[in-house]
Image (spheres, rainbow, N blue to C red):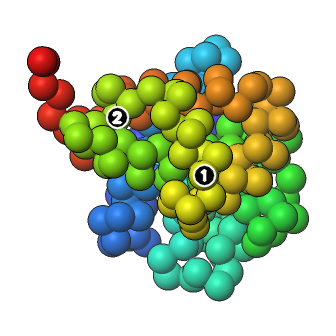
Amino acid sequence: MENLPSRDQAWDLLTEYISSETLQRHVLTVEGVMRHFAGLYHEDEEEWGIIGLLHDLDYELYPDEHCIKVQEILKEKGFPEEFIHAVASHGYGICCDVEPVTYAEKVLFTIDELTGLIYAAALMRPSKSVMDLETKSVMKKFKSPAFAANVNRDLIREGAEKLGMPLEDVITETILGMREIAPLIGLEGEITDK
Ligand SMILES: [Fe+2]
Ligand SMILES: [Fe+2]
């Protein structure tokens, strides 16, 4: 993709629109996981990362126009059409009708909600860490609707299907991606050797 800002420029833009620490942590998490998946698919990590970083750009200031307003903002800033499509498509069927087509788009769609579930699962551990969190424990929480009830499991399932990847594998890779940035997102926790 041409005419993309640097990661630093993208971060500056982000902080113009997002001041909530929780939301900043969310987009940093999504950025890290997108970078991890880009590595798996042998795609451009920087590009996938910036898509993740900016995907919720309009969420704080324009919650009622989420995934719509962002298209306008990014267009004005001169972002390429494909980038705008990628960002908007994570709201497919929820707040817009831009369908995820590329791998980057399908991954974003899938892991947006999933990272929330994994985050909550990590904080439940004695270690409060993602470093010793296992796939099977997340699968268990995935199947119990009362846990992190606001996380939409159907969207995650739908995304994994679009990707053609078993849910377990998507969870494993998302955990690995989050481990790579654990200190940045407050999930390093404290692992004690017993
Ligand atoms: Fe969103
Ligand atoms: Fe998001």
| 66 relative to 95 in the view: left or right | left
- Vertical comparison of 148 with 40: above or below: below
Name the residue beneath numbered marker 2: 130
- At 79% across and 31% down in the image, what residue appears? 163
Gap between marks 2 and 1 measured at Cα = 19 Å
Q: Position of residue 31 (x, y in %)?
A: 48, 42
- At 49% across and 34% down in the image, what residue appears? 137
Residue type indicated by callout 2? Val
Q: Position of residue 32 (x, y in %)?
A: 44, 36
- Vertical comparison of 105 with 40: above or below: below
Residue 107 numbered mark, or none: none
Residue type indicated by callout 1? Ser
Q: Position of residue 184 (x, y in %)?
A: 26, 41
Disc 2 crowd, CA 10 A, few/some/many (<14, 14-19, 20+): many
Q: Position of residue 19 (x, y in %)?
A: 33, 72
Name the residue beneath numbered marker 1: 144
Secondary element at image label 2: loop
